[in-house]
Image: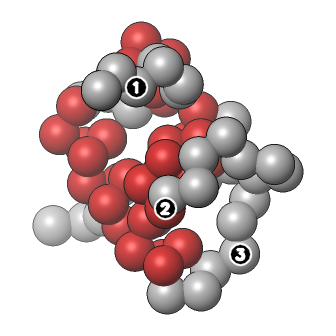
Amino acid sequence: MTMLYPSIDLLMKKVDSKYKLVTVVAKRARQLQDGSELMVNKPVSKKFVGQALEEIAGDKVELVEEEK
């Protein structure tokens, strides 16, 4: 199965690392699953991970670096 939207190229312009992207998407998908409000209108995906990816692609999610 191929993911068409959002493309990895578009997502990599938003996040500087594939590993960070995976972490951010997983956290946001969990928030959506737990009842957080979806920040995109008419998402293409019906799954939480896809919706999280769409939010990142649409600049709806603010990425904040955690202090170590």
Question: Can you see residue 16?
Answer: yes
Query: Depth-wise, is mark 3 or mark 1 nearer the camera?
Result: 1
- Residue 13 x, y percent position in the rendering: 46, 18
State the residue position of label 1. 3
Is there CB contact under 8 Å for labels 2 and 3?
Answer: no
Q: Residue at x 39, y 32 (%)?
A: 15
Q: Residue at x 48, y 19 (%)?
A: 4
- Residue 14 x, y percent position in the rendering: 48, 28
Mark 3 vs mark 1: which is more N-terminal? 1
Left-right relation of 6 to 55: left
- Above or below, 32 against 58 in this view is below
What number of labels is visible? 3
Mark 2 vs mark 3: which is more N-terminal? 3
- Residue at mark 2 to residue at mark 1: CA–CA distance: 14 Å
- Mark linked to residue 37: 3
Q: Residues within 10 Å of mark 1 (few under 14, many from 20)?
A: few
Left-right relation of 36 to 50: right
Q: Amino acid at mark 1?
A: Met
Q: Amino acid at mark 2?
A: Phe
Q: Residues within 10 Å of mark 3 (few under 14, many from 20)?
A: few
